[in-house]
Image (spheres, rainbow, N blue to C red):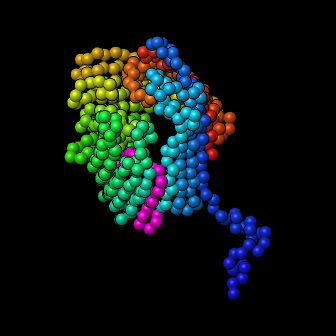
């Protein structure tokens, strides 16, 4: 017969203390954010005010062995000044204002995951965002299988897609399923091939009946890393019988010399209409998106001295339609910029950013040109931070009750942040925006990290 000592039974106070000291604990984390936002518009015959309260929570935990974990996040909004009548024209009404008297609550993700179940390296169940292919939010199951670790792996997922602002959504109307493989033929190189089937039910043009949309999408992506300096990505995607997207990106960082280069090129080769519903989790239909090419380039140099760190960025980015006429959400535009940055000027804390920008509207550079400037100055060190500045946006998309495009937006802002405790941060931000009217916003945020 085994004795108490041989099986580790807690026979005394000393033995209890010894067992507790050797016991590993779960790792838990929690981020909470409370926010008050005031907005007001003046001019254009539409003086309005809006007061909103927001709560955001995200948290999770994992066991000591890293075998099991759980995570989730949610947002809650409350229109503090009351809800206006549905359909009332307003630049400040939100989709979330339709839930009077209850607040609007959205669960962004809530899932449990298991790791290293033999060849099954990952099993995730619940609301989640896809780990492979185009990002999509869904309620379901995803898994990853290590066939020849680390050279070959497979993945699969399936479930009900989620659209947070779909006005005519049903519980079980939109479905998704995907399979694919990950290949690592050599050190630093990763290839991913995926196929996805998607079924969506959408309102017909008569706004009464419903049409069923079934799409087959597929893609091939490549990632290559050479040491710590060079990173390369390339991809293409197909939609049914057409190549829909293609692109590439390069990042070069020569840290020792303080020199870097970022390049990117993306193209949408077909017109997207209802297909947007499957690729955006927030809106059922974003509208027609014409074929385009988009590019970005940023070349930078950093100078590190005893009196601070100083940098110069020179860049070019833009968007050019390759089919159809320009209009809202489909613009030809380009921007050249030169930016000077300075951090810890003389002493730790002060910083400065100054930029000059040139905008044009035609790929031949013969269209209308105009020039703007922007920048900010502030202090960030320890528990205190402050910043004031201004920036310009040629086009801005506003996602309130109606998705709107506004142009030539100049923003002036100021913010102060204070961290009285390691886990507590307070922040106040004021913004003034001028476009076809003046808009004021005051945002007060309290966040806690545990």
Q: Quadrant of residue 325?
A: top left
Q: Residue at x 62, y 34 (%)?
A: 446
Q: Quick check: 437 above or below 349?
A: above
Q: Please say whether residue 121 is one of the residues in the magenta stretch.
A: yes
**Percent of width and height locating residue 283:** 40, 37
Q: Please say whether residue 73 is one of the residues in the magenta stretch.
A: no
Residue 200 visible in the displayed image: yes
Q: Residue at x 35, y 65 (%)?
A: 148
**Percent of width and height locating residue 36:** 59, 30
Question: Magenta region: which residues?
Answer: 116-137
**Percent of width and height locating residue 290:** 26, 32
Furthest toward the right, the residue is 13
Count of numbered circles on the image: 0
Image quarter of the C terminus:
top right
Q: Quadrant of residue 294?
A: top left
**Residue 390 relative to residue 318: left or right:** right
Q: Quadrant of residue 425?
A: top right
Q: Quick check: 161 above or below 36?
A: below
**Percent of width and height locating residue 388:** 54, 21
Which one is in front, 46 or 243? 46
Which one is in front, 164 or 201? 201
**Residue 439 relative to residue 213: left or right:** right
Image quarter of the N terminus:
bottom right
Q: Residue at x 50, y 26 (%)?
A: 85
**Residue 446 relative to residue 432: left or right:** right
Residue 378 visible in the displayed image: no
Q: Quick check: 406 above or below 264?
A: above
Q: Quick check: 288 above or below 57?
A: above
Q: Residue at x 33, y 32 (%)?
A: 287
């Amino acid at each position: 017969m085994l004795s108490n000592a041989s099986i580790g039974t807690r026979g005394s106070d000393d033995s209890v203390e010894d067992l507790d000291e050797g016991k590993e604990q779960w790792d838990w984390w929690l981020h909470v954010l409370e926010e008050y936002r005031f907005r007001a518009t003046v001019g254009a015959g539409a003086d309005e005010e809006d007061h909103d309260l927001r709560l955001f929570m995200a948290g999770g935990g994992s066991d000591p062995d890293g075998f099991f974990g759980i995570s989730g996040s949610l947002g809650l909004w409350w229109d503090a000044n009351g809800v206006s009548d549905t359909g009332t024209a307003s630049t400040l009404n939100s989709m979330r204002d339709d839930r009077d008297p209850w607040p609007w609550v959205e669960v962004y993700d809530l899932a449990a995951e298991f790791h290293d179940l033999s060849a099954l390296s990952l099993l995730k169940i619940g609301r989640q965002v896809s780990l492979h292919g185009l990002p999509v939010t869904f309620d379901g199951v995803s898994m990853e299988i290590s066939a020849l670790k680390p050279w070959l792996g497979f993945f699969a997922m399936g479930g009900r897609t989620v659209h947070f602002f779909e006005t005519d959504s049903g519980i079980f109307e939109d479905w998704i399923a995907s399979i694919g493989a990950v290949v690592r033929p050599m050190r630093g190189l990763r290839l991913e091939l995926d196929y996805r089937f998607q079924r969506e039910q959408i309102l017909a043009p008569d706004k009464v009946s419903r049409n069923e949309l079934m799409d087959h999408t597929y893609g091939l992506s490549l990632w290559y890393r050479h040491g710590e300096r060079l990173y390369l990505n390339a991809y293409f995607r197909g939609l049914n019988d057409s190549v829909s997207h293609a692109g590439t990106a390069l990042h070069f960082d020569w840290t020792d010399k303080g020199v870097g280069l970022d390049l990117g090129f993306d193209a949408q080769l077909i017109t997207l209409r209802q297909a947007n519903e499957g690729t955006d989790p927030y809106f059922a239909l974003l509208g027609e998106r014409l074929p385009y090419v988009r590019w970005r380039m940023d070349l930078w140099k950093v100078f590190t001295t005893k009196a601070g760190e100083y940098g110069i960025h020179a860049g070019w980015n833009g968007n050019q339609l390759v089919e159809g006429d320009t209009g809202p959400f489909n613009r030809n535009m380009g921007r050249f910029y030169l930016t000077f940055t300075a951090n810890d000027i003389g002493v730790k804390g002060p910083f400065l950013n100054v930029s000059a920008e040139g905008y044009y509207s035609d790929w031949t550079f013969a269209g209308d040109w105009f020039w703007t400037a922007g920048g900010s100055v502030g202090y960030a060190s320890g528990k205190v931070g402050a910043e004031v500045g201004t920036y310009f946006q040629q086009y801005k998309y506003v996602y309130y009750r109606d998705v709107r495009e506004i142009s030539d937006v100049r923003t002036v802002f100021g913010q102060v942040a204070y961290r009285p405790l390691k886990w507590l941060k307070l922040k106040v931000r004021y913004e003034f925006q001028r476009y076809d009217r003046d808009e004021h916003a005051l945002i007060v945020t309290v966040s806690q990290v545990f």
